[in-house]
Image (cartoon, rainbow, N blue to C red):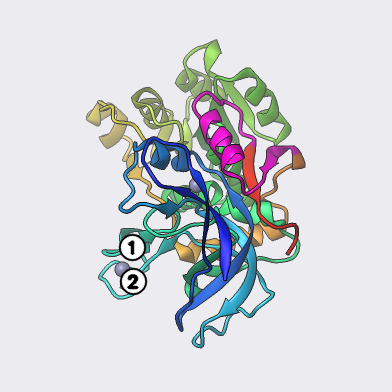
């Protein structure tokens, strides 16, 4: 059996339409008929060669939801016809990290849609353990995109050990920030401050029940300190990826504050250890990816509408190389957080 796929054949060249074989599955795999696949900024980095892929050609796409088509003989938790979303890291389960539930560091971990074929296709084969049941209340497009940015936002919050009643400052209101705000509220936190520079985004922050900190109007650290009577926040989440905002995320903390750094940058950063760290017993925490064990909480929040995406948060394209390439091109100058999703099949 053959299927349509959109593949990366050559670095720094447009993706190409291809007819490839529908993958055969092993005993521990499932075959999913893809319904929706998010187009992620990382995919643009793979295409451009900024982030290296191991082998070519490869089918991109790691934000995947669809219906189970076939299951291997060992798979019991899902059956053909079930709606599922996909955890994007295929891991070994036996290395020293996997046995501790830290599969993001798996010695032989493979990112779906980078190290192995992904969801820009009609069907995808994944290890059965990577398929999570997607409740009927959650659309395929939400199921697809929440497996990347929302999952990483949740992991960031988990790393900060945010507790009910604590305050948080989120730096950046893109895809991650949009989820982080809602997830922080789902954790029953106290005030949420969101630092942003884009005027249109600042307006939408207030409608979600958070306090917008307009970085155009002066130092965000001073604004947060003023708003908290000089106390600072308990937790901060840096999602932008700049040394400047990372410093601010540390400086806006109060005593025993925890700053989680999620955004990527090649810049270095300096801090004053005595006044900014030691005196206050502040912690700076690196955040990378997320864990399969966190996804059930995420799915539950989405099912209970604690994590929700308005219909205008999405635009759709077909499983068509030209349309997908145009969406990847748009990442270079896009500042809004409308997510493009490939609609592969209408509710299959
Ligand atoms: Zn992604
Ligand atoms: Zn492993």
Residue 212, percent across and down?
61, 26
x 49%, y 27%: residue: 332
Residue 86, percent across and down?
54, 62
The answer to whether 55 appears left or right of 317 in the picture is left
Residue 330, percent across and down?
55, 29
- Confirm if mark 1 falls within 8 A of ligand 2: yes
Q: What kind of element bears circle 1?
A: loop
Q: Which image quadrant for residue 144?
A: bottom right
x 51%, y 83%: residue: 72
When the figure is inspected, residue 262 is found, relative to residue 335, above or below; the finding is below
The answer to whether 341 appears left or right of 160 in the picture is right
Res. 189 in view: no
Residue nearest the viewer, comparing 301 with 128: 128
When the figure is inspected, residue 333 is found, relative to residue 10, above or below; the finding is above
Name the residue that disc number 2 marks: 92
Residue 335, percent across and down?
57, 25
x 60%, y 60%: residue: 122
Q: How many marks?
A: 2
Name the residue that disc number 1 marks: 109
Residue nearest the viewer, comparing 135 with 271: 135
Was residue 280 drawn as part of the magenta stretch in this picture? Answer: no
Residue nearest the viewer, comparing 126 with 177: 126
Q: Which image quadrant for residue 94?
A: bottom left
Q: Are marks 2 and 1 in contact (CB under 8 Å)?
A: yes
Q: Which image quadrant for residue 92?
A: bottom left
Disc 2 from disc 1: Cα separation: 7 Å
- Confirm if mark 2 falls within 8 A of ligand 2: yes
Q: Which residues are magenta?
A: 312-338
- Image quarter where the C terminus lies is bottom right
């Amino acid at each position: 059996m053959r299927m349509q796929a959109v593949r990366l054949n050559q670095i720094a060249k447009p993706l190409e339409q291809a007819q490839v074989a529908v993958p055969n599955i092993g005993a521990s795999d499932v075959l999913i008929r893809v319904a929706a696949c998010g187009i992620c900024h990382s995919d643009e980095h793979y295409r451009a060669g900024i982030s290296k892929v191991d082998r070519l050609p490869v089918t991109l796409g790691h934000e995947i939801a669809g219906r189970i088509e076939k299951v291997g003989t060992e798979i019991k938790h899902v059956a053909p016809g079930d709606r599922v979303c996909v955890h994007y890291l295929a891991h070994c389960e036996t290395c020293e990290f996997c046995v501790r539930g830290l599969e993001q560091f798996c010695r032989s971990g493979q990112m779906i849609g980078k190290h192995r074929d992904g969801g820009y296709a009609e069907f995808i084969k994944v290890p059965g353990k990577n398929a999570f049941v997607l409740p009927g209340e959650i659309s395929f497009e939400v199921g697809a995109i929440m497996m990347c940015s929302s999952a990483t936002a949740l992991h960031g919050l988990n790393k900060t050990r945010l507790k009910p009643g604590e305050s948080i400052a989120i730096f950046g209101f893109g895809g991650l920030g949009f989820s982080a705000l809602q997830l922080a509220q789902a954790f029953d936190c106290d005030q949420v401050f969101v630092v942003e520079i884009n005027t249109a985004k600042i307006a939408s922050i207030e409608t979600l029940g958070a306090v917008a900190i307009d970085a155009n109007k002066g130092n965000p650290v001073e604004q947060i300190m003023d708003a908290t009577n000089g106390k600072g926040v308990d937790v901060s989440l840096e999602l932008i990826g700049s040394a400047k905002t990372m410093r601010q995320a540390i400086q806006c903390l109060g005593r025993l504050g925890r700053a989680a750094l999620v955004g990527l940058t090649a810049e270095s950063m300096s801090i004053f250890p005595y006044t900014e760290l030691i005196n206050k017993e502040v912690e700076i925490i690196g955040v990378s990816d997320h864990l399969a064990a966190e996804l059930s909480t995420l799915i539950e929040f989405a099912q209970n509408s604690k994590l929700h995406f308005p219909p205008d948060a999405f635009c759709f394209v077909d499983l068509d190389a030209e349309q997908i390439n145009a969406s990847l091109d748009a990442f270079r100058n896009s500042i809004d957080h409308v997510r493009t999703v490939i609609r592969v099949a209408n509710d299959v």
